[in-house]
Amino acid sequence: MTTAHITYWVVTLLLFGALFVLARNLKMKLWARVLIGLGLGGVMGFVFGGGAAGCAESAGCVPVSTKFLGDAFVRLIRMLIVPLIFTTLTAGVIAMGDPKRLGSLGARTIGMYMGTTIIAVSLGLLFGTLFQPGVGVDLSTVDLSSIDSVKGIIATGDAAGGIVDRLLAIIPENPVAALATTNVLAIIFWAILFGTGILLAGDAAKPVAKVIEASAEAVLKVTEIIMEVAPYGVYALMAWVISTQGLDILVNLGKLTLALYLACFLHIIITYGSIIKFINKLPVKRFFGGIVDAQAVAYSTDSSNATLPVTIANVTDNLGVDKSVSGSVLPLGATINMDGTAIYLGLVALFASQALDIPLDATHYFMIALTATLASIGAAGIPSAGLLLAATVLSVFGVTAEQSVLIIALIFPFDRLLDMMRTVTNVSGDAAVAVTVAKWEGALDEEVFKAKPVA
């Protein structure tokens, strides 16, 4: 172990100790500790990871030695995804008391998600037009070696599978296998069906209903326990990301990065803020204060699915959304609500057209918006899923498979930094829709919403 490694670990342990003392003695809110961990991790990654240039993801890169802490935190959260979705969604259906409510809730949820996605992709196209991120980009020096594993996917033009296959995959042949493989849509389908069966069975299924409801409560308590280590987990993840990615890499595609971050920020503040303020007539500040934990975890893990347990806990405990709504709307949102991806796909389309000098007309803009909307809905809630869908969008205005490879290869090395902001957008949208649907369904405790966050 080098002197740099020893120094890094000594400073890291001192910072961890300080965070622990702050939590115990000053009763600092969890969201504040998470944000501090996020910031400290970024600073440590920059200082010990080669500065602005970053360093290779190897043993010589000091902050990489803490990556296992971040990985452990992500695994702890992912461990909760299946039991949380199944128990909370099934318990939510049971709590409705009437299967007919499912139709109303489902229609409103999907309608809201579709509406915000259309706004999102429009923002992406607008900012792509204003910022012109692809103008002057040199594609001749692009290194293609980093994306060899996805060339085959791009060449086939089917990064997410056919629509028929996606629809069939929703119905699990084996519910246990769906649980084992974390097939989120299949789990949602089975949980709704199982919960409906419990309702229809009446008194005979009451023992099962009690077990499910108790299990949901227990899993939420486990979530609270795991969230106590979130500041340390996000610290490790940010230290690793900043050290290996560096900041110099942003200079090459600074316009694209700035356009994405600004578009996502405005979408979160204006679109979601307007939904909360004008549709729900609720305080916007309380909304964002209530989901800051989920946003911080989303930024560090860049996965909607991995953030789901935290999102459910925040929306339920801080925003007063009934479990019957949060347990159904949020898992669905983590799968089909990808506003950040929609913004990104619109931007990448404009970036490609400008870099390749391909003129676009009104028809192209419409096709890009339509394809990006549909593609984002099919995006998996995992890191960098949106980038693989870019080839589908680019193909609608004549970009060849070979050209798509060039564009994606240029963006791929630092896509994680872009994906982190996309995920924050997705998670914020999930929460806004959950609050809105709960308000419409009479399942929102406004006193809890207007109170200070409990975490």
Image (spheres, rainbow, N blue to C red):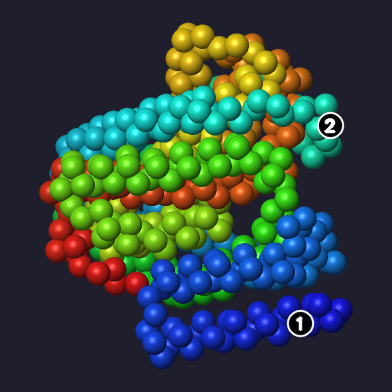
Residue sitting at 31 percent across and 62 percent down?
290
Task: Identify the residue at the far bottom of this view.
Answer: 25
Q: Which residue is mark 2?
A: 141
Query: Quick check: can you spot residue 176?
Result: no
Q: Which mark is residue 76?
A: none
In this rendering, position of residue 127 left or right of residue 208: right
**Residue bearing mark 1:** 7
Give SS at disc 1.
helix
For the point 75% across and 62% down, the residue is: 51
Residues at circles 1 and 2 in contact by the CB criterion of under 8 Å: no
Where residue 328 appears, x then y in whole percent?
32, 47
x, y percent for residue 153: 70, 27
Query: The C terminus lies in which quarter of the figure?
Result: bottom left
Q: Quadrant of the N terminus?
A: bottom right
Amino acid marked by disc 2: Thr
Q: Quadrant of residue 50?
A: bottom right
In which quadrant of the rendered view does residue 319 lie? bottom left
**Residue 27 appears anywhere in the view:** yes
Judging depth in this view, the residue of 357 and 78 nearest the camera is: 357
Neighbour class for label 1 at 10 Å: few (<14), some, many (≥20)?
few
Label 1 – label 2 distance at C-alpha: 38 Å
Q: Quadrant of residue 289?
A: bottom left
* Residue at the image position 59 percent from the left and 42 percent from the top: 257
The residue lying toward the viewer, choosing from 268 and 416, is 268
Q: Is residue 402 above or below residue 227?
A: above
Q: Position of residue 181 (x, y in %)?
A: 56, 47
Lower position in the chain sequence, tag 1 or tag 2: 1
In this view, 448 is above or below 410? below
The total of numbered circles placed on residues is: 2
Residue 69 is situated, as x and y percent measured from the top left of the image, at 64, 70
Q: Amino acid at mark 1?
A: Thr
Residue found at x 79% / y 40%: 146
